[in-house]
Image (cartoon, rainbow, N blue to C red):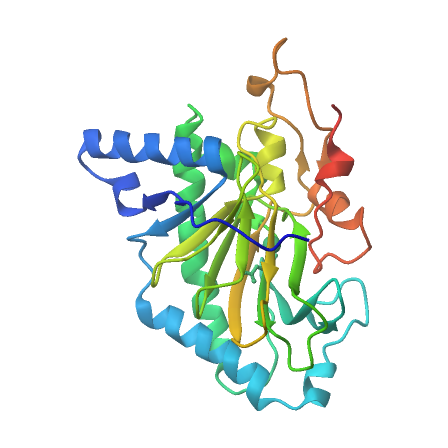
Amino acid sequence: MAEIASDDDIPTIDYSLLFCDDPNKQFHALECLRDACQEYGFFYLVNHTIPDGVFDNILKGVSDFFNQTTLDERRNYSKKFPLDKIRWELNSSAGENREYLKVVAHPQYHFPSNPSGFSKILEEYGKEMRKIVIGLARAVSKTLGFEEHFVEKALNLKSGFDVLAMNLYPPNAKSKGAVGLSEHTDPGFVITLLQDINGGLQILSHKGKWINAYIPHHAILIQLGDQLEILTNGMYKSHIHRVIVGNNKVRRISVVGIHGPSLDKLISPSIEFVDEKHPQGYRGMTYKESLEVNGDDEIDVQSSLEQARLV
Ligand SMILES: O=C(O)CCC(=O)C(=O)O
Ligand SMILES: [Fe+2]
């Protein structure tokens, strides 16, 4: 696998301007968002409402979880049942070198009992990030020419199934190669991502070029998810990304929110996006079905976009 990626720009979207009282500024910000969604499928979100301290707390909380718990304590969260709400795994193989903790964060949130205080940090982070996701759903609806609740209703985000993945690279074990996480897209409406240091994450652009993600301090990287691609019949695409751990010299933590529809919601292309020039490109599936196509675990949130494609 070629690991070289370019330092091309990734669009930056100003969250506060999407809701600005000045109609001209808001219009312009929504145009930028539409371009970012249509051309790229990923962007940095700045001027959001999440206080810096919430980011600092979650990154420290995740670091403490990996540092201050014993391997046996973490192993308690290894896979037991398909419907596990907390999952820990350590992968050290040619295809993946990552240690992770995943928790279901919505409609109910779940958390490990150690370290003490971690649950509060996770809850606070989850709440703040959800507000941003709902705001984005409203702005994205407008960029598609709909009233602002279109996406929220189409995906039933009120009861949305959210998973928080907390990743450690290289893992607390010897890495076996340069791949932190192999190429994939993620399900859901959007994926939110923050990290403690830059380096490692690469996204495949619409021009077929790998781009390094250098996330500005306290910005959020937003990636569009598979179910938004399906809903818009391919207009707003979910993009392939991967993590390269390089020489394993640097330790990096990422906190990834996969914000999905409600599990029972049937997601298929909305009729407004289907016409003679744009035939229906995906079959309808409930979110639960789509998560279980590639394994029976909801918390693993595996993409099944390829199985949904019709053309
Ligand atoms: O760690 C990263 O930067 C990306 C992780 C990722 O793609 C995922 O958890 O789905
Ligand atoms: Fe991902």
**177 displayed left or right of 131:** right
Q: Quadrant of residue 78?
A: bottom right
**31 displayed left or right of 184:** left
Q: Could you tell me if residue 59 is visible in this image? A: yes
Q: Could you tell me if residue 148 is visible in this image? A: no
Q: For the point 62% across and 39% down, which residue is it? A: 227
- Nearer to me, 212 or 132: 212
**206 displayed left or right of 305:** left
| Residue 137, percent from left and from top | 45, 40
| Residue 2, percent from left and from top | 64, 52
Write down which quadrant ligand 1 falls in: bottom right
| Residue 86, percent from left and from top | 67, 70
- Nearer to me, 286 or 29: 29
Q: Quadrant of residue 49?
A: bottom left
Compared with 111, 38 (above or below) is above
Q: How many marks?
A: 0
Q: For the point 53% across and 62% down, which residue is it? A: 200
Compared with 108, 270 (above or below) is above
Q: For the point 38% across and 36% down, which residue is it? A: 33
| Residue 175, percent from left and from top | 69, 75
- Nearer to me, 166 or 289: 166
Q: Quadrant of residue 10?
A: top left
Q: For the point 26% across and 31% down, which residue is it? A: 28
**85 displayed left or right of 169:** right
- Nearer to me, 94 or 311: 94
Q: Residue most toward the left?
A: 22
Compared with 166, 114 (above or below) is below
Q: Quadrant of the C terminus?
A: top right
